[in-house]
Amino acid sequence: MKRARIVHQWVEQEATERDGQLLLADGQLLPFDAVHWLPPLEPVAQPRTILALGLNYADHAKELAFKAPEEPLVFLKGENALIGHRQVTRRPEGVKFMHYECELTVVIGREAKKVQRADAYDFVRGYTVANDYAVRDYLENWYRPNLRVKNRDGATPLGPWLVDAADVPNPMALALSTTVNGKVTQSGNTKDMIFDVPFLIEYFSSFMTLRPGDLILTGTPDGVVDCRPGDVVVTEIEGIGALMNTIA
Amino acid sequence: MSFLAMRTVYGTLLNFRGELDALGTKMHEAPYGAPPRAPVLYIKPANTWSADGSPVTLPAGVGEVEVGGTVGVVMKAPGEVAGYVLMNDLSLPHTSFFRPPVKSRCLDGFLGVGSTLLEAAADIDPSAFKLEVRIDGELKHAVDFAQLVRPAAQLLADVAEFMTLGPGDVLMLGIDAGRPLARAGSRIEISAPGLGTLSNTLVAGEAA
């Protein structure tokens, strides 16, 4: 099932996808542009841990002139960064290079501690799409990528859907693409990840406990380009969804 | 300070002059190339939070940990401070600050959180805070918050330039150089006038 979280008539609620429309709990069917979309995440009591990978596709690592990492390059994000489908992300004034990053995102479903790779999928609630924007002008070599690059308010659109894990038989073979104003600028496949989803769950849970609702953004392949105000950016993953965002 | 009210907890690297002095010319060398311009932040996720008085279990194979006595600024609303709380920001010792320190700072239990919130008031200046770290009763670290590179108000303003600190978010002011080491069995007490005492004991974890 594909689940969204939306605000409709001032009420935050879950909705599901039905024949290209949103089905609300009260039976109403609404077009996608009739509601305000939130990240497709059930509320959690404590702030969720948001792990994000850098350089996790061999081609992207090459593009950025780094050698492929020997262990995951990971950074954390705050919830301030997350926004939903069909929202707006601000490009800071005066910057030269702000790019999208289309990323398969894992939503953890059960407390995960010292999980073995072979059992890792049992801990996945589902999948969604993240667009993990980066403003490269602000990169510095201290705890890189630093939060000024990667933790800006509303600079990580997430959605549209949380797709149940049961509906994604093989998350490691999904086509992934980004369009800017309708033109394809990035295409890849999750099979090219350096550290795949089971590896990442085993790795993180070896030193930190993951909890339901925590997120792993698994990195992006080759093909990032600068985005300007007014650009409409759609990051899409096969079977997961097409996440739309507009730059302002 | 109740965990229930706490949202994202941010730490700040290199906000004490002593830390910059300790790095010296290395800041200009590879891989850094230059001293930092913007605040250098990291996140202590909820799995790291340990209540005052509770033990912190070290993973098997971890010998020594760095003790990071600091003060967290607790936000009431964007631009508005609720108060201040003691924090024990533990980490595995690491000498490279090039990559984000997730594996060294985000271990379960690696952030002791004080139980006393000193409410913000006009006559409270965070630059006047003085904090002491004791390990098994012995004074190991004395921290003077007059030595901050960015005093609290400036740090908050510079961070707000790129992200919002909302209600319950916490921004730790930094950890001075000379961070003491502790090991399983160590009792760590962090105290500061007005902020009370934060105590945590390190215990050895069982091998897997």
Image (tube, rainbow, N blue to C red):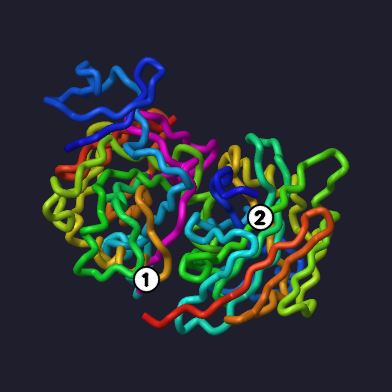
User: Which of the 4 image quadrants contains residue A177?
Assistant: top left
In the rendered image, the residue lying farthest to the right is: B123
Q: Which of A35/B21 is in front?
A: A35
User: Do the dots labelled 2 and 1 sit on one chain?
Assistant: no
Q: Nearer the viewer, mark 2 or mark 1?
A: 1
Provide residue A178's location: percent of width, then percent of height: 25, 42
Q: Is residue B174 left or right of residue A25?
A: right
* Residue annotated with mark 2: B172
Quick one: SS at disc 1? Answer: helix
Residue A228 highlighted magenta (yes or no): no
Question: Is B88 situated above or below A189?
Answer: below
User: Which of the 4 image quadrants contains residue A16?
Assistant: top left
- Examine the rendering and report whether any part of residue A204 can be seen: yes
**Which disc is residue A206 wearing?**
1
Report the Cα–Cα distance between label 2 and label 1. Answer: 26 Å
- Subunit that carries the residue with mark 2: B
Name which residue type carries label 2: Met
Question: Is B17 situated above or below B23?
Answer: above
Q: Which of A174/B86 is in front?
A: B86
Q: Which residues are magenta?
A: A71-99
